[in-house]
Image (cartoon, rainbow, N blue to C red):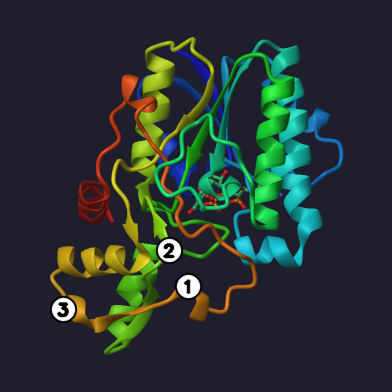
């Protein structure tokens, strides 16, 4: 049994981590009521956690367009807080499990990104998360950086007010047809699988620290994902129509082809394909 702190325990991933880890570990749940990650100095807020084995950092400012509008908040939470957390973990011999993103890449590689590929973020969110990764690599002694993408979980992302699946199901109830981007490719990933992968790293006492891609083992466009959501929930897949990324008015640029290769994490936990992950999610939601 390990003593584990989940930072951001009420978030989408944090909620599934609580469910997965609680039976076999001593858990401390930490929410924004316990820690303000946007504070310039968080040392006194982290101090109560100095005797734990693992800290899992699910805290992030996740609204991609919001980060473009408020870069200071993005860098405080995603970068400066992560730096202080990495230093705190090193000073107290704590293993840090930090969550990062596919948005550190520019999406120009024509096939899946490996853990060793060079990041080149396109937006403030990606840049602030990449700075967080650099802080972890340079200041934490024992760490795992898990790069995840396009998360959907039963709790819904607190920073976005739901998740993509709930949004598409809501649109299907309210509209006869709507458009979804068909030329932006991703690996939609169920937060429960990320939580199970983290549990595997902890339970198997994995010592090979470093970066791990932790996404579903197959990819699709957001349009194809929507068709699959409709198919699996017994609805007409023709209600959704394709639209091009370039015709969608995002504030922040996004990587258009952001597939992560999940071979490395499969040594400890085999990530399912996105259709199986969606099916599992729909059975729980
Ligand atoms: N969602 C995605 O599609 C996606 C894609 C790629 C990577 N990721 C990464 O995956 C991780 C988890 O994402 P998620 O979808 O679970 O996000 P989420 O549901 O929005 O959770 C984020 C958590 O951060 C906490 N938080 C935000 N600002 C804070 C602050 N100033 N002080 C303290 N806590 C703060 C929130 O706490 P409260 O709930 O208490 O406010 C929440 O628990 C993040 O690192 C994110 O960058 C997510």
Give coordinates of residue 240: x percent, y percent: 28, 79
- Between marks 3 and 1, how big is the CA–CA gap? 23 Å
What is the number of the mark on residue 147?
none
In terms of secondary structure, where does tag 3 sit?
A: loop
Give coordinates of residue 55: x percent, y percent: 59, 25
Which of pointers 3 and 1 lies earlier in the amino acid sequence?
Answer: 3
- What residue does disc 2 label? 184
Residue at coordinates 57% horizontally, 14% vertically from top-left?
Answer: 53
Which of pointers 2 and 3 lies earlier in the amino acid sequence?
Answer: 2
Is 266 on the left or on the right of 59, as rendered?
left
Give coordinates of residue 243: x percent, y percent: 39, 79
- Between marks 2 and 3, how big is the CA–CA gap? 22 Å
Question: Could you say which is closer to the camera, residue 162 or residue 110?
Answer: 110
In terms of secondary structure, where does tag 2 sit?
A: loop
**What crowding class fits label 3: few (fewer than 14 Cα within 10 Å), some (14-19), or many (20 or more)?**
few
Is 125 on the left or on the right of 220, as rendered?
right
Dividing the picture into quadrants, the one containing residue 131 is: top right
Residue at coordinates 28% horizontally, 56% vertically from top-left?
Answer: 285
Which of pointers 1 and 2 lies earlier in the amino acid sequence?
Answer: 2
- What residue does disc 1 label? 245
- Between marks 1 and 2, how big is the CA–CA gap? 6 Å
Residue at coordinates 73% horizontally, 53% vertically from top-left?
Answer: 74
Dot 1 and dot 2 residues touching (CB under 8 Å): yes
Residue 36 visible in rendering:
no
- What residue does disc 3 label? 236
Dividing the picture into quadrants, the one containing residue 260 is: top left
**What crowding class fits label 2: few (fewer than 14 Cα within 10 Å), some (14-19), or many (20 or more)?**
some
Q: Quadrant of the N terminus?
A: top left
């Amino acid at each position: 049994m390990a003593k584990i702190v989940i930072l951001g325990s009420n978030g989408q991933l944090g909620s599934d981590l609580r469910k997965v880890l609680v039976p076999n570990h001593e858990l401390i749940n930490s929410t924004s009521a316990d820690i303000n990650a946007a504070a310039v100095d968080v040392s006194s807020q982290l101090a109560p956690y100095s005797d734990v084995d693992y800290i899992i950092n699910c805290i992030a400012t996740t609204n991609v367009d919001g980060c473009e509008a408020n870069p200071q908040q993005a860098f405080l939470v995603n970068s400066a807080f992560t730096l202080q957390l990495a230093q705190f973990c090193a000073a107290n011999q704590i293993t840090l499990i930090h969550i990062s993103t596919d948005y550190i890449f520019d999406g120009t590689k024509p096939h899946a990104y490996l853990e060793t590929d060079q990041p080149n973020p396109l937006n403030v969110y990606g840049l602030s998360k990449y700075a967080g990764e650099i802080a972890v690599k340079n200041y934490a002694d024992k760490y795992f950086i898990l790069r995840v993408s396009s998360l959907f979980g039963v709790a819904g992302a607190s920073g976005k007010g739901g998740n993509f699946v709930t949004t598409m199901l809501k649109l299907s109830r309210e509209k006869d047809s709507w458009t979804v981007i068909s030329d932006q490719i991703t690996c939609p990933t169920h937060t429960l699988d990320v939580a199970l992968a983290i549990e595997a790293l902890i339970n198997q006492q994995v010592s090979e620290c470093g970066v791990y891609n932790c996404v579903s083992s197959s990819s699709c466009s957001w349009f194809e994902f929507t068709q699959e959501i409709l198919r699996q929930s017994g609805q007409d897949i023709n209600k959704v129509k394709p639209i091009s990324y370039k015709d969608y008015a995002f504030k922040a640029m996004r990587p258009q082809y952001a597939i992560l290769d999940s071979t490395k994490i499969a040594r400890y936990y085999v990530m399912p394909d996105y259709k199986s992950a969606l099916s599992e999610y729909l059975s729980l939601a």
